[in-house]
Amino acid sequence: MQVLELIIFAGLAAIVLYQLYSVLGRRVGRQPEDQAAAEPAQGSVRAVDRMAEPADDGVALTGLAAVKALDPSFDVGHFLGGAKQAYEMIVRAFADGDRATLKNLLAPQVLASFEAAIDQREAEGRTESVEFFHPPRADLEKADVTGADLGRVTVRFLAEFRSRTKGPEGEAVDDRRTAELWTFERNLKSRDPNWMLVHVDAAEA
């Protein structure tokens, strides 16, 4: 009788252990490798930056990967922070007619168009000033390398500011909301870390 009971208990124990194994042996919840695979989706700037790691497989690199291959120190977040500062500086300098500041930040063809507008405003006896309501928003639109080592990065800016214009007929106040694509350029092999504004396009808000 005791032997029969031991056999029954042994059989029950085997069944219980099998059920525990069938449950505990499965992958439940998010595993460490799942977390690593999901990390690139945690924000556009971080995702683009992660995907930009160049692979040493002989394949020609394009986009942000090409920029980082020539300048491994390039950081999207740092670049966009500097681009926002440059945006405000250029808009203010244009309003103030500050040609010296614009000359250090603009490519010759862009500088020529800005100076032509400043000349016309001064010929009409007008002055202008701007006041930003808050820092502009800057988003990476695209990045690439042209030629051998010329980096080009396009940033979409959304900005809101108040423009005050004074002229012979009096003062005018204009609250503006602008959306523009600004393209910056730099020789990625140069020791000069500064990017120049080479093109401005209107964009959809």
Image (cartoon, grey):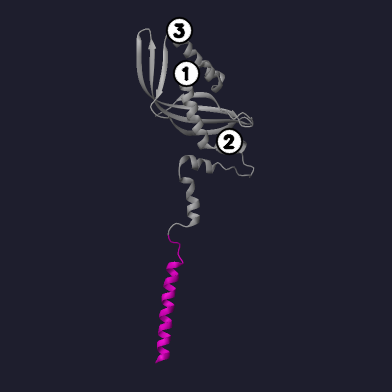
Please tell me the numbered disc located at residue 94: 1
Q: Secondary structure at mark 3?
A: helix
Q: Residue type at mark 1: give it.
A: Phe
Residue positioned 62% across, 41% down in the render: 59
Residue positioned 42% across, 13% down in the render: 127
> How many neighbours does mark 3 have within 10 angstroms: few (below 14), some (14-19), or many (20 or more)?
few
> How many neighbours does mark 1 have within 10 angstroms: few (below 14), some (14-19), or many (20 or more)?
many
Residue 4 on the magenta segment: yes
Earlier-in-chain disc, 2 versus 1: 2
Residue 91 on the magenta segment: no
Q: Residue type at mark 2: give it.
A: Val
Q: Secondary structure at mark 1?
A: helix
**Highlighted magenta segment, given as a residue range:** 1-28
Which one is closest to the eye, mark 2 or mark 3?
A: 3
Please tell me the numbered disc located at residue 80: none
**Residue 6 x, y percent position in the rendering:** 42, 86
**Residue 47 x, y percent position in the rendering:** 49, 43
Residue tagged 3: 123
> How many neighbours does mark 2 have within 10 angstroms: few (below 14), some (14-19), or many (20 or more)?
many
Residue tagged 2: 67
